[in-house]
Image (spheres, helix red, strand yellow):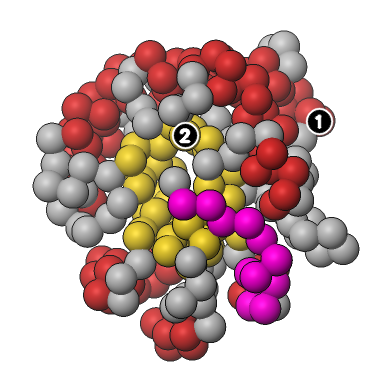
Amino acid sequence: MNEKIILALDLSTKEEVEKTILKFREKIKWVKVGMELFYSQGPDIVHYLKDQDFSIFLDLKLHDIPNTVGQALKNLCKLPIDMINLHTLGGSKMMSEASAVVKDSLYSPYLIGVTQLTSTDEQAFIELGFRGSLVDNVAHLAQLAHQNHLDGVVCSAHEVPIIKNICGADFLCVTPGIRLLGSSSDDQKRIMTPDNALKLGSDFLVMGRTLINNPQLIDQIPGETL
């Protein structure tokens, strides 16, 4: 079973989910429930997937004032989830309070910080008014997440070596934008193949449409047990 891949269930209905997971039940451990699916199906889809023995990454990218994020996490962490994320741009106070809530919750999932979306390239980064380079900004946000007791970050595989060097080998790097050779990049900008991402130190590889449309490709992707 591949324990490195997180299958992104970027779907809208439970029927689509049921049909998709049948293809991967014996192949993968992790699935990702994002905004599209969670806002459509609500907490029931999380309970359903946990009943199917999957580890669940709830990808809602929380970003608000510290109290609001903390209260949201108190409710979300009542669900049987194994990983959840927030935006590091919310700042130290938000991350610190969020970490305390999550660590004290029933399931105590990994808390992961989003640095810069992998759909953001240098041009978009400049357009948003950030200073310095995109890579330096990601490294700074990762260090801030580490200082505020998060378990890791969501980042491009390109930035993993820098983040591991700053934050340590145990600091998790969850990397979307993973594409097999010849696959469409879709709306991702900073992309990489699975083999190269793993060589650079990625702990988890988030993959969606590429695998959902071609489930046989899962056997070509390394997936060492963590």
- In front: 98, or 181? 181
- In primary-sequence order, the first of circles 2 and 1 is 1
Task: Identify the mark at residue 172; answer none if there is no mark.
Answer: 2
Give the x, y percent position of residue 192: 76, 46
8 vs 90, left or right, is right
Furthest-right residue in this view: 182
How crowded pointer 2 is (Cα within 10 Å; few <14, some 14-19, many 20+) is rated as many
Snapshot quadrant of residue 113: top left
- In front: 40, or 3? 3
Give the x, y percent position of residue 148: 34, 18
109 vs 127, left or right, is left
How crowded pointer 1 is (Cα within 10 Å; few <14, some 14-19, many 20+) is rated as few
Label 1: element kind:
helix
Residue 87 higher or lower than 59, as above or below: above
Residue 225 higher or lower than 172, as above or below: below
Give the x, y percent position of residue 106: 12, 47
Q: Is residue 35 visible?
A: no
Residue 187 higher or lower than 162, as above or below: below
Give the x, y percent position of residue 127: 75, 27
- In front: 126, or 119? 119
Q: Which residues are magenta?
A: 215-225
